[in-house]
C-alpha cells in the first residue's frame, strides 16, 4: 500500500463539503474535542484562500 502525507480532494459537491464541515463542528462542540473544530477551521481557511474569498463568504457560498 502507498503511504500518503497529504490527500487532496479533486471534486466534491458543495453539499458534501458543507456536511463534512457541519459534522466536524457538531462533533467538536458535543465531545469537547477541540481538534475537530481546529480541523474544520483549517479546511475553511484553506478553501476560502483558494476561492479568493473571506471565510464567511465561502461558508455562505456553500450554504446556497
Image (cartoon, rainbow, N blue to C red):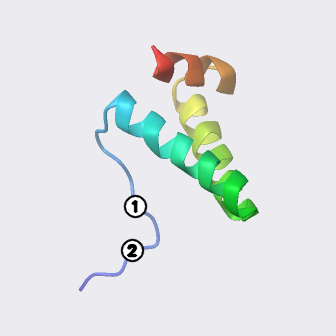
Q: Position of residue 44 (x, y in %)?
A: 60, 38
Screen quadrant of the C terminus = top left
Q: Residue at x 31, y 32 (%)?
A: 13
Q: Residue at x 59, y 30 (%)?
A: 48
Q: Is disc 2 placed on a helix, strand or loop?
A: loop
Furthest residue toward left: 1
Screen quadrant of the N terminus = bottom left
Disc 1 target residue: 7
Q: How many marks?
A: 2
Tag 1 near tag 2, CB within 8 Å: yes
Quarter-wise, where is residue 52 in the image? top right
Q: Position of residue 60 (x, y in %)?
A: 57, 17
Q: Position of residue 26 (x, y in %)?
A: 61, 48
Mark 1 and mark 2: Cα distance apart in space: 7 Å
Furthest residue toward front: 30
Confirm whether residue 52 shows in the render: no
Q: Which mark is residue 4?
A: 2
Q: Residue at x 67, y 45 (%)?
A: 41
Quarter-wise, where is residue 15 in the image? top left
Q: Which mark is residue 19?
A: none
Q: Residue at x 50, y 17 (%)?
A: 61
Q: Nearer the viewer, residue 32 or 51?
A: 32
Q: Residues within 10 Å of mark 1 (few under 14, many from 20)?
A: few
Q: Position of residue 63 (x, y in %)?
A: 49, 20
Q: Nearer the viewer, residue 30 or 2?
A: 30
Is 43 placed above or below 15 here? below
Amino acid at each position: 500500500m502507498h503511504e500518503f502525507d497529504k490527500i487532496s480532494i479533486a471534486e466534491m459537491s458543495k453539499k458534501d463539503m458543507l456536511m463534512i464541515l457541519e459534522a466536524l463542528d457538531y462533533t467538536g462542540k458535543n465531545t469537547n474535542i477541540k481538534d475537530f473544530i481546529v480541523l474544520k477551521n483549517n479546511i475553511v481557511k484553506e478553501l476560502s484562500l483558494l476561492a479568493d474569498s473571506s471565510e464567511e463568504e465561502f461558508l455562505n457560498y456553500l450554504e446556497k
